[in-house]
Image: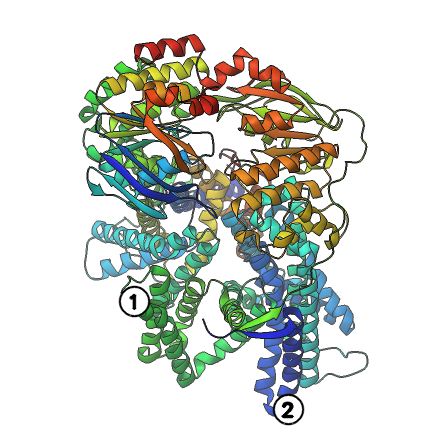
C-alpha cells in the first residue's frame, strides 16, 4: 500500500479507537437523558476526576484493577452528587437552570483538581506491555486496545443489566413514564439517581482508559464534554448503539483533520458536523422523532 | 408587611429618573475616583454592560442558555482590530465589529434556534469552541496565539484619551440600554417572551416563533460585536485565548447574579464581572464580602429553624456553598489559585438562592415598600367582527388518518364546515377529538388524507402554515404566556390595531378588569376566556375551540355559551370540541360525533340525540347488552 | 378500607377537587361517576399520591397516607390503574407485567420464575396478552393496552384497585370486554374503586356510587338506588 494512505489509515484507526472512549462518555449522557431528560455539562470533569482518582489510588500502591474500580466508585458518587445538588432542584422548577448548575459543578471540580493535583499533565500508569501490535502495517498500542475493549464491555454490561435485571427494567420503565412507574411501586427518584451514578462511573472509567493514551490534566475536561456530547447528539440522545459508530467516526475525523490541516484544527470538523447534525436532525441520526403534546 | 409608600410616579418614570441619575453619577465618577486603574475598571464595566445586555436577550428573554456570547464578543473585537489595521476610521471600525459578530451570530442562530434546552446550549458551545480555534489557527490574518495589537484611531479628528473613551463607552452603554428596553418592551419583545412560555401557542397564533428567536439572537450578537469593538479599542491588544470558556463562565455569572430579563440586572452583573477578578487580589476586601455573603445566605435557614421547620434544599445549598467559600477565604494559602472554584461557589449560590438575581430581589423588595401609580389603560375599541370575505369552505377535511404506535387516534375522517357555521364535535374521552384539532391546526402531520382551510392547503405539520391559511385555536391543556399580562397576551397575537383594539378583545370576553394581571395569576376559567380572545384577535377564518368548558364553573359556562353565540352571530366559522352535550346542542348548527377515531354520526343536534349509534357510543355498550349485564347484576 | 376526608387537590390555579369525602369498604366496588373534567381523575391521583393533596386527609387500612409518594402508596397495596392506560410502550408485554410486581421481586435474582405464578394467572385472565408476551406494549391496540394496564396492577397483588376511566378511547365491543373483566375481578373478592364517565355501566357494576360534578360530590348512595334516581337518570342515563 502507498505509504501516504497507510499513514492516513494509521491515523484513522488510532482516532477511531480513541473515539470509543468518547462513545463511552456519550453513553453516560444517554443514560441520564433517558432517565430524567437531563445531561451533565460537566461530564468531562468527571472523566478527569476519575483519571486523577485512578492515578492517586495507583500512587498509594493499589493494583491497577483496584484503582480503576476505585476511580469508578468515585465517579459514581460524583454522578449521584451532581444529580442531587444541581439537576433535581432545577428540573423541579422547570427552567434551564440545571444546565448552568452542571457547568458550575464542573468548574468547581476543575478548581479542585488544579489545587489538589496541580496544573501539569501527568502520565497514567498501566500494567500493559509497552510494544505495539501490527495489523497489516497499522500499529495499535495496548492502551488503545484497552480503550476499545473497556468501552465496549462497560456498555455491553450496562445494556445487559438494563434488559435482564429487574432494576434495569425498572429504570427503563421510569424513562418511559415516570408517573406510571411510581404507580408500580418504583421509586423514580432512586432510578434517576442510579442512572446518574452509573453514568458517572462510566465517565470515570473512560478517564482511566484515556489517561494512558493522552496523559491527564485539568485542561482535558472541557474538550471531552463537547466531543462526547457531539457523539451523543449525532447518534441520538435516546438510541443505543449508534453511539459506537458516531464515536469512532468522530475520533477518526479528528485525527485525520489534525494530520491534514494541522494540529490546531483537530476539533473543527467534529464541531461543524455537530452543528450541522443538530440543524438537520435534532433528534439524532439514529434517534426517533419526538411527538409534541398539547 | 411593612408600610407601603404611595408615590404618584409611574414605575417607568421612576426607573428613568434613577437611570439618568446613575448615568450622570457614573460620568462624574472619574473626577472623584482618579487614576488609570479606576478608569480602566470603569471602562471595562461599561463594555461588559453592553455585552451582558446582549446576552440577556437570549439567556433572559429567550430563556435559552447561550454559551456563544464570549466568542461573539471576541469576533467583534477581532473585526474591529482588523478594520483598524487596514486603516478604517473610528465609526467604520465600530461597525466592522458589529458586523463581524452579527453575521456569524445570525448564521448560527438559524440552525441553533430550532433547538431547545441542552441541544441549544451545546450548539452554541460548539460554535464558541470553533470560533476560538479559527481565531487561533488563521495565523496569516489574526496572527494566531501571538495576538494582535492596534492603535486607537481618532474619532472625528479628536484624539480620545482614556477618560474620553470611558465617556464614549458610557454613552454607548446607555444607548444600548435604552434601545434594548425599547425593543424588548415593544411587541417584538412581548413576542419573544411569549414564545419562551409556549412556542406551540405562538406558532399556532401566527406570532412566528423562529423569526423572533432569530431576532433576539441577532440583537444579542450585535451588542456582543459592539462590546467587542469597544474592548478592542480600549485594550489595543487581543489574544484568542481571552475569549474562551473562562470568560463565558464569567458572563453567565454576571447575567445570573445581576438578574435575568432586566437591563438593570445586566448592569449590576457587569459591575460584578468587572470587579470580581480584582477582588480576589485584595484579601481583606474579599474575606469581608464572603463573610457578608455567608451571613445573608444563612438568614433564611435560621428563619426556618426558628419557626421549627426543616430547612429546604433551596435555602441550605447556597449557605453551604458560601460556607465553603468562607473556608477558602480564611484558609487557602492563595485565593487566586482557587479562582474558578470561588466563582463556581458564587454562581451556585446565585443560581439556587437568587433565581431572579440581585435586580429581581431588589425589585421585589421595592414593590413591597413602594406603590407606583399604575399605567393608564387604553380605551376599548372594536370587538368581535366578522372575518374578511373568502371563497370556499372554511374547513374541508378528507380521509384524515393518524396513528400513534398501535393506536389509531384518527381513522379516516371526512368533514366540512360551511361559511358561518358552528360545528360541534363530541365523543367519549380519548375518541380522537383533540388529535383531530392537532392535525387541522398543523401540530401533527397526518399519516394520510388532506386538510384545506379557507380553500388553501397548508403544509402538513406546520402550525404557521395552518395559521396563514386562517386557522386559530385554543388548547385543552392551557398554553398561557405566563410572563405577560392579559392585555399584552392579546396585543402580541393581534393581527391589526394597537392597545385599544387589544382592550376591545379583552372586553369582548369580559376580562377588561383583568388587563394588568399577569397570566400566571389568572384563574383557570379566565385563562380559557383569554385563549379565546387571543385566537379571535388574529381574525381567524376558522376558530377551533378545544374543550373550552372543561373545568369551568357553571356561571362561567353560561358566559361561554353567550360568547360563542356572539362569535357565531358575527359569522366566524367555529369548530367546537366539547363534552357537555347540552352546550353543543345549544350552540351548534351541526354536530359531529367521534368514537374510536372515526366519525360515527353527523347531523343537527336533534338528529344526533336520537341516533342509536351515538347513544351506544355514549353509554359504552349496546343498549341490549347493557341491559343483559344489568340483569345478571340483578339491577333491572 | 380507604377513606378520604375533605380532600382538595388540583393543578396550577384552581382546585379540580374541592373538598371530597369518600369511603370504600373492603370487598366492595365503589363507582365515581361524572362528566369529563369533573375532577374524577384528579381525585384518583390524589388518593394514590400522584398529586399531592392541598388539603384533607386520606386513610388506607386505618393508616394515614396523605402526601406519601405514589410508590409508597402502591407498596401498601393501594394501586391505581391510570387514565389513558400508561403502559410502558418500549418494553415488552411481559416486562410490563413484571414491573407491576416490582416491589415484590428481587432485583437481580431469577425474577421471572418468582413471578411465573402471577403471570400465568394474568395470561389465563387475558389470553391475548399471553399470545403477545414478547411484543412491544406500544404496538398493542387500545383495548389490549387496557388489558395490560389492568394486568399490571393485578400483578402487584393489590388490596384495593383504583381503575381510572378504563373505557377511555375504546371501541364499544372492547369496552364490554373490559367491563366483563372488572366484573369477574369484583366477583373474586377484589375491592375496587371505579372512576367512569359511562354512568349506566358504572352504576350496574358497583355497589355504591358517588356522583361528582365540578370537583364536589353532589349525590351518593347505593348504585341501585342512584340508577333509579330521576335526577341521575336525566343527567347521565338519558
On the picture, is B238 further left or further right than C170?
right
Residue B524 showing in the rendered view: yes
Q: Mark 1 vs mark 2: give the one in front.
A: 1
Residue under the point 63% across and 41% down:
B532
Say which residue label 1 marks.
B307
Which of B286 and B192 lies nearest the eye of the viewer?
Answer: B192
Examine the rendered structure and indicate whether residue B580 appears above or below residue B497.
Answer: above
Examine the rendered structure and indicate whether residue C82 appears above or below residue B311.
Answer: above
Residue under the point 45% across and 57% down:
A222
- Disc 2 is placed on an element classified as helix
Q: Residues within 10 Å of mark 1 (few under 14, many from 20)?
A: few
Examine the rendered structure and indicate whether residue A196 appears above or below residue B457.
Answer: below
Which quarter of the image is occupied by the C terminus of chain B?
top left
Examine the rendered structure and indicate whether residue B100 appears above or below residue B275.
Answer: above
On the picture, is B533 further left or further right than A166?
right
Mark 1 / mark 2, whichever is N-terminal = 2
Residue occupying the far front of the picture: C230
Chain assignment, label 1? B
Task: Give percent across and percent down for residue B187.
Answer: 70, 55
**Residue B31 - label:** 2
Task: Give percent across and percent down for residue B83.
Answer: 73, 68
- Disc 1 is placed on an element classified as loop
Amino acid at each position: 500500500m502507498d505509504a501516504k494512505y497507510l499513514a492516513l489509515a494509521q491515523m484513522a484507526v488510532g482516532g477511531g479507537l480513541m473515539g470509543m472512549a468518547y462513545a463511552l462518555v456519550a453513553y453516560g449522557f444517554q443514560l441520564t437523558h433517558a432517565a430524567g431528560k437531563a445531561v451533565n455539562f460537566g461530564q468531562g470533569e468527571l472523566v478527569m476526576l476519575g483519571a486523577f482518582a485512578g492515578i492517586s489510588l495507583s500512587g498509594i500502591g493499589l493494583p491497577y484493577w483496584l484503582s480503576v474500580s476505585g476511580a469508578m466508585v468515585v465517579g459514581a458518587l460524583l454522578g449521584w452528587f451532581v444529580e442531587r445538588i444541581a439537576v433535581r432542584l432545577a428540573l423541579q422548577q422547570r427552567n434551564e437552570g440545571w444546565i448552568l448548575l452542571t457547568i458550575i459543578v464542573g468548574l468547581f471540580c476543575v478548581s479542585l483538581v488544579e489545587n489538589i493535583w496541580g496544573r501539569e499533565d501527568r502520565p497514567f500508569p498501566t500494567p500493559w506491555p509497552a510494544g505495539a501490535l501490527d495489523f497489516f502495517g497499522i500499529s495499535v498500542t495496548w492502551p488503545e486496545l484497552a480503550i476499545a475493549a473497556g468501552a465496549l464491555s462497560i456498555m455491553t454490561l450496562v445494556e445487559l443489566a438494563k434488559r435482564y435485571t429487574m432494576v434495569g427494567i425498572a429504570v427503563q420503565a421510569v424513562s418511559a413514564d415516570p408517573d406510571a412507574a411510581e404507580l408500580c411501586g418504583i421509586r423514580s427518584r432512586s432510578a434517576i439517581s442510579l442512572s446518574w451514578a452509573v453514568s458517572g462511573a462510566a465517565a470515570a472509567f473512560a478517564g482511566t482508559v484515556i489517561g494512558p493514551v493522552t496523559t491527564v490534566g485539568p485542561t482535558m475536561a472541557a474538550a471531552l464534554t463537547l466531543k462526547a456530547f457531539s457523539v451523543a447528539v449525532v447518534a441520538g440522545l435516546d438510541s443505543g448503539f449508534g453511539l459506537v459508530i458516531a464515536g469512532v467516526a468522530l475520533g477518526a475525523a479528528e485525527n485525520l483533520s489534525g494530520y491534514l490541516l494541522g494540529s490546531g484544527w483537530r476539533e473543527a470538523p467534529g464541531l461543524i458536523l455537530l452543528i450541522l447534525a443538530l440543524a438537520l436532525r435534532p433528534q439524532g441520526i439514529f434517534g426517533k422523532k419526538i411527538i409534541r403534546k398539547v | 408587611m411593612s408600610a407601603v409608600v404611595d408615590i404618584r410616579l409611574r414605575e417607568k418614570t421612576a426607573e428613568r429618573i434613577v437611570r439618568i441619575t446613575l448615568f450622570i453619577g457614573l460620568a462624574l465618577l472619574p473626577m472623584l475616583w482618579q487614576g488609570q486603574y479606576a478608569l480602566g475598571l470603569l471602562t471595562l464595566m461599561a463594555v461588559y454592560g453592553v455585552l451582558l445586555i446582549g446576552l440577556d436577550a437570549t439567556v433572559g428573554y429567550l430563556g435559552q442558555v447561550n454559551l456563544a456570547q464570549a466568542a461573539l464578543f471576541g469576533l467583534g473585537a477581532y473585526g474591529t482590530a482588523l478594520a483598524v489595521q487596514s486603516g478604517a476610521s473610528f465609526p467604520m471600525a465600530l461597525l466592522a465589529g458589529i458586523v463581524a459578530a452579527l453575521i456569524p451570530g445570525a448564521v448560527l442562530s438559524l440552525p441553533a434556534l430550532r433547538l431547545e434546552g441542552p441541544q441549544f446550549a451545546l450548539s452554541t458551545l460548539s460554535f464558541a469552541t470553533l470560533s476560538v480555534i479559527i481565531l487561533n489557527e488563521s495565523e496569516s490574518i489574526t496572527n494566531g496565539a501571538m495576538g494582535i495589537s492596534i492603535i486607537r484611531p481618532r474619532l472625528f479628528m479628536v484624539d480620545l484619551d482614556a477618560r474620553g473613551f470611558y465617556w464614549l463607552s458610557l454613552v454607548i452603554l446607555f444607548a444600548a440600554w435604552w434601545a434594548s428596553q425599547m425593543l424588548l418592551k415593544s411587541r417584538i419583545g412581548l413576542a419573544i417572551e411569549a414564545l419562551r412560555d409556549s412556542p406551540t401557542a405562538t406558532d399556532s397564533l401566527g406570532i412566528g416563533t423562529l423569526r423572533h428567536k432569530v431576532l433576539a439572537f441577532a440583537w444579542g450578537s450585535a451588542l456582543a460585536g459592539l462590546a467587542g469593538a469597544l474592548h478592542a479599542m480600549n485594550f489595543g491588544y487581543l489574544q484568542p485565548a481571552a475569549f474562551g470558556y473562562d470568560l463565558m463562565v464569567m458572563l453567565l455569572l454576571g447575567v445570573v447574579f445581576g438578574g435575568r430579563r432586566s437591563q438593570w440586572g445586566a448592569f449590576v452583573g457587569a459591575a460584578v464581572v468587572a470587579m470580581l477578578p480584582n477582588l480576589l487580589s485584595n484579601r481583606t476586601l474579599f474575606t469581608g464580602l464572603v463573610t457578608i455573603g455567608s451571613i445573608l445566605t444563612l438568614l433564611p435557614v435560621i428563619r426556618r429553624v426558628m419557626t421549627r421547620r426543616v430547612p429546604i434544599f433551596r435555602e441550605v445549598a447556597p449557605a453551604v456553598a458560601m460556607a465553603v467559600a468562607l473556608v477558602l477565604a480564611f484558609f487557602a494559602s492563595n485565593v487566586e489559585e482557587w479562582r474558578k472554584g470561588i466563582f463556581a461557589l458564587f454562581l451556585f449560590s446565585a443560581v439556587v438562592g437568587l433565581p431572579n438575581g440581585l435586580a429581581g430581589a431588589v425589585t421585589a423588595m421595592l414593590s413591597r415598600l413602594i406603590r407606583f401609580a399604575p399605567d393608564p389603560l387604553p380605551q376599548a375599541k372594536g370587538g368581535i367582527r366578522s372575518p374578511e370575505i373568502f371563497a370556499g369552505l372554511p374547513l374541508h377535511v378528507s380521509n384524515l388518518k393518524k396513528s400513534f404506535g398501535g393506536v389509531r387516534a384518527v381513522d379516516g375522517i371526512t368533514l366540512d364546515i360551511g361559511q358561518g357555521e358552528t360545528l360541534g364535535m363530541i365523543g367519549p374521552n380519548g375518541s380522537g377529538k383533540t388529535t383531530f384539532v392537532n392535525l387541522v391546526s398543523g401540530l401533527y402531520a397526518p399519516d394520510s388524507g388532506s386538510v384545506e382551510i379557507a380553500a388553501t392547503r397548508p403544509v402538513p405539520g406546520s402550525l404557521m402554515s395552518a395559521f396563514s391559511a386562517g386557522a386559530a385555536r385554543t388548547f385543552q391543556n392551557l398554553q398561557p404566556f405566563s410572563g405577560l399580562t392579559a392585555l399584552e397576551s392579546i396585543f402580541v397575537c393581534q393581527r391589526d390595531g394597537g392597545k385599544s383594539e387589544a382592550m376591545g378583545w379583552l372586553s369582548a370576553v369580559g376580562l377588561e378588569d383583568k388587563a394588568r394581571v399577569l397570566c400566571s395569576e389568572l384563574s383557570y376559567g379566565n385563562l380559557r376566556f383569554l385563549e379565546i380572545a387571543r385566537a379571535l384577535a388574529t381574525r381567524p377564518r376558522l376558530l377551533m375551540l378545544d374543550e373550552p368548558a372543561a373545568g369551568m364553573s357553571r356561571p362561567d359556562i353560561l358566559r361561554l355559551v353567550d360568547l360563542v353565540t356572539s362569535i357565531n352571530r358575527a359569522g366566524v366559522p367555529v369548530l367546537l370540541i366539547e363534552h357537555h352535550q347540552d352546550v353543543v346542542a345549544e350552540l351548534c348548527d351541526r354536530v359531529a360525533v367521534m368514537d374510536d377515531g372515526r366519525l360515527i354520526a353527523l347531523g343537527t343536534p336533534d338528529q344526533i340525540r336520537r341516533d342509536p349509534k351515538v347513544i351506544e357510543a355514549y353509554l359504552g355498550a349496546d343498549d341490549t347488552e347493557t341491559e343483559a349485564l344489568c340483569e345478571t347484576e340483578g339491577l333491572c | 378500607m380507604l377513606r378520604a376526608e375533605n380532600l382538595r387537590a388540583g393543578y396550577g390555579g384552581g382546585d379540580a377537587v374541592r373538598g371530597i369525602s369518600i369511603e370504600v369498604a373492603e370487598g366492595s366496588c365503589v363507582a365515581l361517576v361524572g362528566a369529563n373534567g369533573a375532577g374524577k381523575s384528579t381525585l384518583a391521583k390524589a388518593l394514590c399520591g400522584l398529586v399531592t393533596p392541598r388539603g384533607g386527609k386520606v386513610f388506607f387500612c386505618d393508616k394515614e397516607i396523605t402526601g406519601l409518594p405514589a410508590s409508597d402508596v402502591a407498596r401498601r397495596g393501594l394501586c391505581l390503574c391510570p387514565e389513558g392506560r400508561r403502559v410502558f410502550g418500549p418494553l415488552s408485554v411481559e416486562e410490563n407485567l413484571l414491573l407491576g410486581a416490582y416491589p415484590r421481586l428481587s432485583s437481580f435474582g431469577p425474577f421471572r420464575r418468582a413471578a411465573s405464578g402471577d403471570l400465568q394467572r394474568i395470561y389465563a385472565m387475558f389470553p391475548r396478552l399471553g399470545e403477545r408476551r414478547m411484543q412491544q406494549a406500544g404496538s398493542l391496540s387500545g383495548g389490549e393496552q387496557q388489558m395490560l394496564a389492568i394486568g399490571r396492577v393485578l400483578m402487584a397483588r393489590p388490596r384495593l384497585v383504583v381503575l381510572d376511566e378504563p373505557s377511555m378511547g375504546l371501541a364499544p365491543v372492547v369496552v364490554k370486554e373490559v367491563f366483563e373483566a372488572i366484573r369477574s375481578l369484583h366477583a373474586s373478592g377484589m375491592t375496587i374503586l371505579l372512576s367512569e364517565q359511562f354512568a349506566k355501566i358504572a352504576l350496574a357494576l358497583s355497589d355504591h356510587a358517588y356522583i361528582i360534578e365540578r370537583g364536589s360530590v353532589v349525590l351518593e348512595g347505593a348504585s341501585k338506588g342512584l340508577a333509579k334516581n330521576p335526577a341521575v337518570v336525566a343527567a347521565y342515563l338519558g
